[in-house]
Structure formats: structure tokens, C-alpha cells
Image: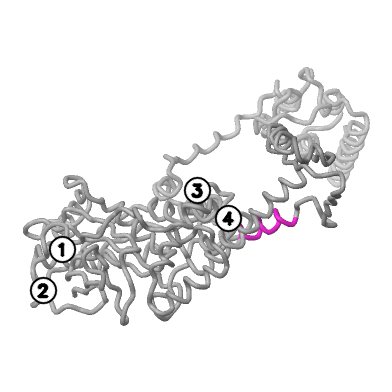
């Protein structure tokens, strides 16, 4: 469906081919125009807004353009918000899943990429930037420059000062049509920045920003006067009546020649007293300027440097500087404007009625928090779940692969029983065993006992003692005790093991004696 500049639908069968070339003859020069922001006072701001409420938006839209030139805080915030959208890639997707729709989408994407490059007109990126300029005055407009056969040559921005709002319509006021005319169909890309419901003439952020700029400007003048009065010395010269009559001009010139400090010449009969406020440090001026700056940031960006879920302006990039919902709303509004006022007529003129219209969009989703995602993956892994390597590599942007499983622990070496490494390859606690191998370690003693079993691999003293005790109970403790205990340095540990060993030996001897007595034999 086609729409005219007033938003009224145009019946497709009645739509005519677009007018070729540039139609708008409005001057791009403001020569002869007066600045609406010059000597701005609260009374002037109120006058501009009252006139706009009646439909005459000329002075208010001029003021909106000049605010960005004369207020650095407004200029910075607006540029940040524009760059946030311009930094989002623009994509073109088919209108449906048919092969024809894919063909149309590819052709329209090529037309957008080539727009403005051969005819020195505005490109698609320029068009997006111009449409984002609707934020302050409430609307923005660009003419579509068509070529023969529905070719999209480019765009031409039309400044808001060339429009006026009359009888419920937004009319273009070219140089030769002071009463205003309507743009031809399919020739205007028009975006309305709807910040509130109601009339278009009350849209935009120019109204609150105009008051903030006015108050900040007046406050800045007072601050400069304060600095001139209290931050610089003031020279005075008291002269008699004769000097006042004869040399007053020379003395004044002498004082002016001393620099910008200021000064004056008075007769001796004149007395001046400089009255100072109770707070003469100037903090009140700086506090007001800071309040205005933060208010401007909140109005335009939705957050200040210390607020917002993304940390505000401290992030340092345009996307995070603008509140996410505002960024997404700007992208959606500009995309809708291009879809309805550029993509739709282009498709109609090139492919006829009923052809699937390609869809323009911006990729403005916030970047994924990889640190939080890594925490989720670790939690799932601890719970027994396993992540896919390919998916993890894609999410993190790194070529990831799983670590090889650790090698199996080596067989217990008798010579390492008193060494610095255990079976796990980790350093053992110092002071638990002699650094030099003991003469009779557990494995060698097990071989000497004739059992042939040895001591199984161990990685701690507790496991070694347990394994040794089992061997001692089986093969006899007298032969093993002295040699085993020589491998430990700690007297308390050695005493404990000694008592345990002989207790086990005594228990084994008593069992053997009971068995022999039951058989009528003699003990050894």
C-alpha cells in the first residue's frame, strides 16, 4: 500500500509512475534568515511555542536546528543517539519465502547500496541520519529522487524550516509558493518523531530542551559575570577635580591598557562599595549547569553517565550509551518509514501490484553477556551436562576443543616410596618421608616376604600405612617393623605405627597359638 505525505493510503491501481528527477526547489541556504536563538529569553521561548500551537512552526523548528549548534551538551547527546542507530547493520529480508521474494529483496538491497553514489545525492546512510534528525523538531523529510523506470537514484534532504503546519496538513513552502504546497505521491520520505499523542506541531523534544538551553545560557552569562567580577582585580583611580577635568581620558586609557581586569576613574568625593553575596565561590552556577547537563542526557539518551542497567555513558560505545529500549524504538521507527515510503513504491514501480515487498530492519540486539553465559555452562557441567564444542566455539567466537583426559596414574615404584612425588604426580607434604629412598621400602619388603603381592600404588601416607599393615598382618611384623619405620622422620607418626604394628602382630600370634593348641601342636 502506498501513502501520501499526509499518511493517507493511495490505491495501488491508480498509482502513477514516479516523477523523475528533483522536484523540491526549496533553498538550501539560510541567507537572510534571522537566528531564532539569538538573545534567547524565556519570553521568546514562550512566544515560539505559542505560535507553534497555532500551526506556525517556523521559529520553533529554526530554534531546534540552532540548539544543536549552540549547546554542546545537546549536540553531544544527539550525535551519540544518531551514531547508536547508524552503527547497527541494516538488513533486507524477503517479503515471503518464495523465490520471487528473494529476487526482489536482493534487487532492493542493491538499489539501496547504490543510491546516491552516481548522482551526488544523499545515500541510504545519509537518509537514515536525516530521518533521525526528527527528534528535536518532531519530524524530518527527504525527497526521493527517481530515475527512469522506477530506478532509485538517491535522496535529497529538505530542512524542516521549509515546512509549515496549516489546516491540519504539513505543507512545503518553496521559494515561489509562500502559501505552501503538498508533495507529489511517492516523492517524500517523511518521519514523525511521536513523543506524545496529539498534533504534529507539538511533537519533538525541542520544547523541554529549549527551556533547559535558555536557563543554562542565562546561568552561563551570570557565571562569566561572576568570574569577571570576583576572579579578576578591579582597579580604581581617585583624582582631584583638576585631574578629573583635564586628565580623565588619559587615566581611563591607562587603566584599559592594563588588560581585561577592569577599572574606573572617580573623583575623590565618590565612594564605591562592592557588595558580595554570602556564597561567593561560584558553586551555585556550576551546580545549575550540571543539573541542566544531566537533564539533557536523560531526555535524549534515557540515562546519565551513572545510571541505567548498562552503566550509562561509562561503557564508551554508542550502543551502550543509549538506553536499549530507546535504541530499538529508533531502529524500528526508521525501518518502518523506509519500508512504507521507499520499499513499497520501489517494488510497485519495478515489479507491479501484488509483488512481495522486501522488509528493511536493523540488527540492534544487545551483545550477549559471555561472562554470564560461561557461568551457566559451568553450572550445567557441574550438574553432569555436556556442552557441544561447535556451539560453544560459535558463541564465544573462539575455536574451542576439549582437553585430553589425564593419563592413568603410573604403577607404584618402590624407589619412589620416599621420593618427592606420589602416584598422582603431585608434590607430597614435605617432612612426611625421608627424601632418600629407605633401605627397606614397602614393595621390597613385600617381595622379601615371599608373598609376591607387593604394596598397591598409593598417593598418601595414610594409604601407605593401611597397605603396609595388611601386609604385616599377613607376613609377620617383626621383620617389617624396623625397616618400615626407618622411612619416616616424624617421631609421633613412627610411634603410632610401631604400636599399631606390634598390636597387629600380637593379635596374629595369639590367633596362631590358639589354632595350634586346638590341634594339639606346639607353638614356634
Q: Earlier in the sequence, mark 2 or mark 1?
A: 2
- For the record, the magenta segment spans 284-294
Q: Residue at 22% of width from left, 72% of height from top?
A: 181
In the image, is 158 to the left or to the right of 44?
Answer: left
In contact (CB < 8 Å): disc 2 and disc 1 = no
Q: Nearer the viewer, mark 2 or mark 4?
A: 2
Instruction: Give the number of the disc on residue 317.
Output: 3
Q: Position of residue 350 (x, y in %)?
A: 9, 62
Count the marks: how many? Answer: 4
Q: Nearer the viewer, mark 1 or mark 3?
A: 1
Predominant secondary structure in magenta?
helix
Q: Earlier in the sequence, mark 4 or mark 3?
A: 4
In the image, is 98 to the left or to the right of 372?
Answer: left
Q: Say above or below: 498 vs 186.
A: above
Q: Nearer the viewer, mark 2 or mark 1?
A: 2
Q: Disc 2 and disc 3: Cα gap in Å?
A: 44 Å
For label 2, the SS is loop
Q: Disc 2 and disc 1: Cα gap in Å?
A: 12 Å
Q: Earlier in the sequence, mark 2 or mark 3?
A: 2
Q: Return the residue at label 1.
A: 346
Q: Say above or below: 232 vs 320.
A: above
Q: Residue at 33% of width from left, 71% of height from top?
A: 164
Q: Return the residue at label 2.
A: 15
In contact (CB < 8 Å): disc 1 and disc 4 = no
In front here: 487 or 170?
Answer: 170
For label 4, the SS is helix
Q: Return the residue at label 4.
A: 312
Amino acid at each position: 500500500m502506498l501513502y501520501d505525505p499526509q499518511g493517507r493510503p493511495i490505491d495501488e491501481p491508480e498509482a502513477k509512475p514516479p516523477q523523475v528527477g528533483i522536484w523540491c526547489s526549496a533553498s538550501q541556504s539560510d541567507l537572510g534568515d534571522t537566528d531564532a536563538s539569538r538573545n534567547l529569553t524565556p519570553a521568546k521561548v514562550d512566544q515560539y511555542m505559542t505560535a507553534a500551537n497555532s500551526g506556525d512552526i517556523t521559529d520553533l523548528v529554526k530554534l531546534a536546528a540552532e540548539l544543536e549548534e549552540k549547546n554542546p551538551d545537546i549536540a553531544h547527546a544527539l550525535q551519540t543517539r544518531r551514531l547508536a542507530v547508524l552503527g547497527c547493520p541494516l538488513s533486507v529480508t524477503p517479503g515471503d519465502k518464495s523465490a520471487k521474494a528473494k529476487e526482489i529483496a536482493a534487487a532492493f538491497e542493491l538499489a539501496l547500496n547504490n543510491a546516491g553514489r552516481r548522482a551526488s545525492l544523499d545515500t541510504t546512510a545519509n537518509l537514515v541520519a536525516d530521518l533521525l534528525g526528527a527528534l528535536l523538531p518532531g519530524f524530518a523529510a527527504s525527497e526521493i529522487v527517481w530515475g527512469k523506470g522506477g530506478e532509485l537514484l538517491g535522496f535529497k534532504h529538505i530542512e524542516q524550516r521549509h515546512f509549515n503546519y496549516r489546516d491540519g496538513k504539513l505543507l512545503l513552502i518553496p521559494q515561489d509558493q509562500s502559501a505552501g504546497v503538498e508533495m507529489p505521491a511517492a516523492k517524500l520520505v517523511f518521519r514523525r518523531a511521536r513523543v506524545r499523542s496529539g498534533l504534529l506541531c507539538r511533537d519533538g523534544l525541542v520544547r523541554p530542551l529549549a527551556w533547559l538551553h535558555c536557563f543554562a545560557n542565562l546561568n552561563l552569562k551570570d557565571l562569566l559575570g561572576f568570574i569577571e567580577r570576583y576572579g579578576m582585580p578591579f582597579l580604581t583611580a581617585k583624582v582631584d577635580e583638576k585631574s578629573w577635568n583635564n586628565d580623565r581620558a588619559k587615566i581611563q586609557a591607562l587603566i584599559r591598557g592594563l588588560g581585561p581586569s577592569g577599572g574606573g576613574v572617580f573623583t575623590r568625593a565618590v565612594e564605591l562599595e562592592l557588595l558580595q553575596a554570602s556564597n561567593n565561590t561560584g558553586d551555585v552556577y556550576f551546580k545549575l549547569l550540571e543539573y541542566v547537563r544531566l537533564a539533557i542526557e536523560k531526555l535524549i539518551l534515557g540515562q546519565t553517565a551513572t545510571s541505567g542497567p548498562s552503566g550509562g555513558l561509562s561503557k564508551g560505545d554508542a550502543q551502550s550509551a543509549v538506553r536499549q529500549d530507546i535504541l530499538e524504538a529508533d531502529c524500528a521507527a526508521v525501518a518502518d518509514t523506509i519500508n512504507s515510503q521507499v520499499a513499497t513504491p520501489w517494488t510497485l514501480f519495478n515489479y507491479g501490484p501484488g509483488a512481495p515487498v522486501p522488509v528493511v530492519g536493523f540488527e540492534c540486539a544487545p551483545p550477549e553477556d559471555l561472562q554470564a553465559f560461561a557461568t551457566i555452562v559451568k553450572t550445567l557441567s557441574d550438574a553432569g551436562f555436556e556442552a557441544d564444542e561447535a556451539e560453544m566455539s560459535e558463541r564465544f567466537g573462539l575455536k574451542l576443543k576439549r582437553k585430553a583426559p589425564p593419563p592413568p596414574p603410573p604403577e607404584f615404584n618402590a624407589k619412589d616410596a620416599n621420593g618427592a612425588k606420589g602416584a598422582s604426580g603431585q608434590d607430597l607434604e614435605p617432612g612426611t618421608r625421608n627424601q632418600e629412598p629407605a633401605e627397606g621400602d614397602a614393595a621390597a619388603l613385600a617381595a622379601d616376604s615371599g608373598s609376591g603381592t607387593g604394596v598397591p600404588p598409593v598417593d598418601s601416607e595414610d594409604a601407605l600405612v593401611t597397605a603396609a599393615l595388611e601386609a604385616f598382618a599377613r607376613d609377620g611384623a617383626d621383620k617389617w617393623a624396623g625397616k618400615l619405620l626407618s622411612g619416616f622422620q616424624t617421631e609421633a607418626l613412627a610411634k603410632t605405627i610401631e604400636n599399631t604394628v606390634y598390636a597387629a602382630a600380637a593379635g596374629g600370634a595369639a590367633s596362631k597359638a590358639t589354632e595350634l593348641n586346638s590341634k594339639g601342636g606346639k607353638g614356634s
